[in-house]
Every structure is written in structure tokens, then in C-alpha cells.
Image (cartoon, grey):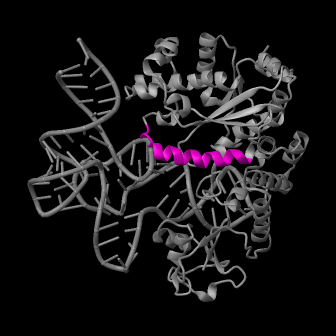
Amino acid sequence: MTTENALSHAKSPFLKEAFARGYLHQCTDVQGLDKAFAAGPVTAYIGYDCTADSLHVGHLMNIMMLRLFQRTGNRPLTLMGGGTTKIGDPSDKNEARPLLTDEIIAANMAGIRGIFSKFLSYDDGPTGAIMANNADWLEGLKYIDFLREVGRHFSVNAMTKMDFVKRRLDNEQYLSFLEFNYMIIQGYDFLELSRRHAVLLQMGGSDQWGNIVQGIELGRRIDGKYLFGLTVPLLATASGQKMGKSAGGAVWLNADRLNDFDYYQFWRNIEDADVGRFLKLFTELPIEQCDALGAAQGAAINEGKKILAYETTAMCRGKDAADAAASAAATTFGGGGVSADLPKVQAEAGAIEAGMSIQDAFIAAGLAGSKGEVKRLIKGGGARLNGEKIDSDALMVTAADIDAETGAVKLSSGKKKHVLLVA
RNA sequence: GGAGAGAUGGCAGAGCGGCUAAAUGCGUCGGAUUGUAAAUCCGAUCCUUCGGGUACGGUGGUUCGAAUCCACCUCUCUCCA
């Protein structure tokens, strides 16, 4: 029975819906896993490295899958890679990355933790999510003991055949023993979690398939356990682009890295062809409704984009944030008025009243990186002050430009990027 | 261990003594078109107090003048053992 076929026969609510919504890419044993669900709540985990202080939309699909997992009566476990981040995942890289310090890792972990509590419920019930940190068991490992228990089950012959190892060896690029150990350590995490929290299933991006399978092997060899693995597809736009760029950078889930308005706008501006698929992946609306919205033709498809943007923003940033972003978008793109809910940036005290060059104002607002950039923007006809096109780079922003209602001047770079520079 | 080749802007990749802030492509940012979409087309794309200043792996040298020539150093790749 093919995976596809087995999935369409799956009985468990989780597998059925995950399949229908498009979360599933590969699974080690669909039928076996389906049976496991029938026996009661299953615990599954996804690991996250702490390489940045926020996660971005690229991580969102598997977070949504964990959420679905919990909603369908199971227990999700989020594993923070406090230990593995010290090694650094080499699998998708061509060269070693600089090692992160303990302080940076700790700060990153704090930032990431906050996100999960928005999507999962960490209560004490039978399906309450668990937060674990692999530093708890990795840092105390005794080297010789570890080698004897775990190391002997790993075949170097097989490891050198892995894609990324092969590539580095073939190109004679330096591959440190440290990096070489990543897959062993990650495989060991699965074993450890199966012991500590009775975790039965590891999920992850399709690039994690190899690591997941290693963990399953290890569980079978050492503890005689039968574990499962499941991956989500790589997320790309309909026209083949990598997901996750918005007005000038990555689409971060943390509000302090990307404001609510821009987060909303990211979803509002996706390609037509992605509407149905994204609604299924990133909202919890009924599948039929998602399909119906995605099937709309022409300008009518915008309805689905608005719903997608509202739902995703509400989930990640809260209902109030979603309402504010939606209304800011409606006034900004509909009527042309100034909405008080546009992203705000605080200017230096008294700077605008004293008279600020247009270049400095754009830089202060974060809409440009240098004065030259502002000049170019003006020359290209894309710079606006309070909605009025700016024709001269000698223009000064003064107290007269401050809007009484918002107490700010509105700066725009192009049609879509707007910032209120608060006096 | 021996013999070659190379290191250029966010990336890929030309240039091989002055005409080079450095071709071209990608990316990015604007504009047009449209539906706040995609595709397409057009323009821009080091910083600047607009005098100039920095920049072609690093350090010295040759020259009126170097990304381009020389020496050494660092790293990468290819072939031979």
C-alpha cells in the first residue's frame, strides 16, 4: 500500500485532517501510526534550534501541525535545541557556521518559547503540551558511556553516504567531528524523549527526514521500541519562490521583530494560486470553506486573502492586533486616509518640531538604510509624506506636517510600506 | 609530499596597467499596468557634510597611475603521488 493510499484510508482524526489539509509529506509507517492513535493519545515532538530569537513563517506550518495534533486529542512536545544549537545543524550548509555562545542561545530560546504559548496550550491535562530542552540531557552526557551506549549503533560507513557528508567530503570541504556528531545527538534526542515522556512520533520538515530515521533506528536497537516519523512538505509559493519575505525582510512571528500590520500584509499579499492551500495550512477554517475561497476568480479572490490575513494575524498576534491591522489596511488602501493603526516608530524627542531632513526622517522610520537610498526613492517617485509625493530631497519635515489626530507624520516608501513617525 | 588554477559588489560572474564605482545575469528597491495578486515592461541599485571618501582575500613593493605587474602570507579548487 502506498503512503498516499494508506493515508486516504487513515482512521485517526489527526492523520485524516493532516492529510486533507496538506501537512503530510512522508511518513515511516502510516498504518502503524494510525493504529497507535486508536490506542489513545499519542505524544509527538518537533525540535527547534535556537539560532535566532524568533521563529518565522517557515516554521509556521509545523507549528500549525502540532496545534492540529493537540486539537485532535494528542499531546505535543516542543523541544528546544539548547544543546544541539551548540553544535549547529550542518545538513543544509556547505560550511560550518560560527558557534553561538551560551548567552545568545539562552536569549534566543526565551524569544522562541513565547511564540509557542500562542499556538499551543501548555496545561496539565492529558493533551497539555510539554516544553523540553535537550540541554537537560545532552550537557551531562559522559563521553565514554555515550559512545558505548549510542555510538556503537551508528555506522560510519552509512553516515559517510549521507548527502551532506558526501558533498563535503567530495568537495574536500572541512567537516568537523563536531558537526559530524549532530545526527547522532539528534537521533539520541528521540530516544531520550521516548524514555522521558513516552514520545512515540517525531515530526519535522522534509529536510529532517534523515535525522528522524536515525532516531527511530536508535530506539529500535537500544530499547526495542517501535517509533514513528513524519515530515511536512517544504513550503513554497505557487510560482516556486521560497516563502517568507515581506516588506524588507523575513516574516518573523515575534511582534518585536515584525509589526502586526506588516505581518497582516504579508498574508494579504500572497499569490492568488496559494489562497486555498494556505487557508488550509495556516487557519483552522473548515476545509470546504478554504477550497471555496481559494476557487474564487479574479478580484473576488481578495476575500480569501483578507480572511487568511485576519485569521493568521489573530492567531499569532491576537484578535485586537488583527482588527487593528485589518482596519489600517482598509483605510490605507481603500480610502487613502491616515489610520492610527499603521506601524509607529518613535522619532527622537523634538526632532520633527526642530525640522528634520526628509532623509533623516525616512532613516529614522526604518524605511531606508542610507541617505542615498532615500534620494533614489524620491527620484524614482516612490516617497511620500502624509500621502503627498515628495519631489525634492531638500524637503524638511516640520511641526506643520504633524497630524493632530495621530501626533505623527506618515511616511511611505512605495504604495505598500507606511510608517507613522511619531513626534 | 609534487604540479597547476583561483580569491572581484548581497550572490553568480566579466575585467587583466589609465576610458573601471568596476560589463552582464540574479537578487533587492521604486515606477507603469492590475485586484494591495501573479506575469510583463521601465528605472534605480557603495557612502557622503556633494568637496570628496572608501572598495576588487591580507600585508608590503614597482609605477605619474594598479582590481589588473612583483614578493610574501591566508584560504579554496584541480591534477599527480
Instruction: Work out whether residue A221 or residue B57 is closer to the camera in this orientation and state it.
Output: A221
The answer to whether residue B32 is left or right of residue A171 is: right
State which quarter of the image contains the N terminus of chain A: top right
Q: Looking at the image, which residue is at 47% across and 24% down?
A: A181
Give the percent coordinates (x, y) of residue A423. 60, 80
Question: In the visual, does A351 lie left or right of A290?
Answer: left
Identify which residue, A184 or A124, lies in the foreground: A124
Tell me if residue A100 is in the magenta stretch.
yes
Q: How many marks?
A: 0
Residue A423 visible in image: yes
Q: Which quadrant holds residue A80?
A: top right
Task: Confirm whether residue A154 shows in the render.
Answer: no
Q: Tell me which residue sits at (60%, 87%) in the image.
A: A399
Please state the horizontal and vertical placement of residue A186, each as a whole percent of the image.
56, 26
User: For residue A9, which quarter of the picture?
Assistant: top right
Looking at the image, residue A141 lies above or below residue A21: above
Report the span colored magenta: A97-118
Residue A257 pos. (x, y %): 60, 56
Q: Assess whether residue A408 is covered by the magenta stretch.
A: no
The image position of residue B46, as x and y in percent, is: 42, 63
Q: Main secondary structure of the magenta part?
A: helix
| A265 vs A194: above or below | below
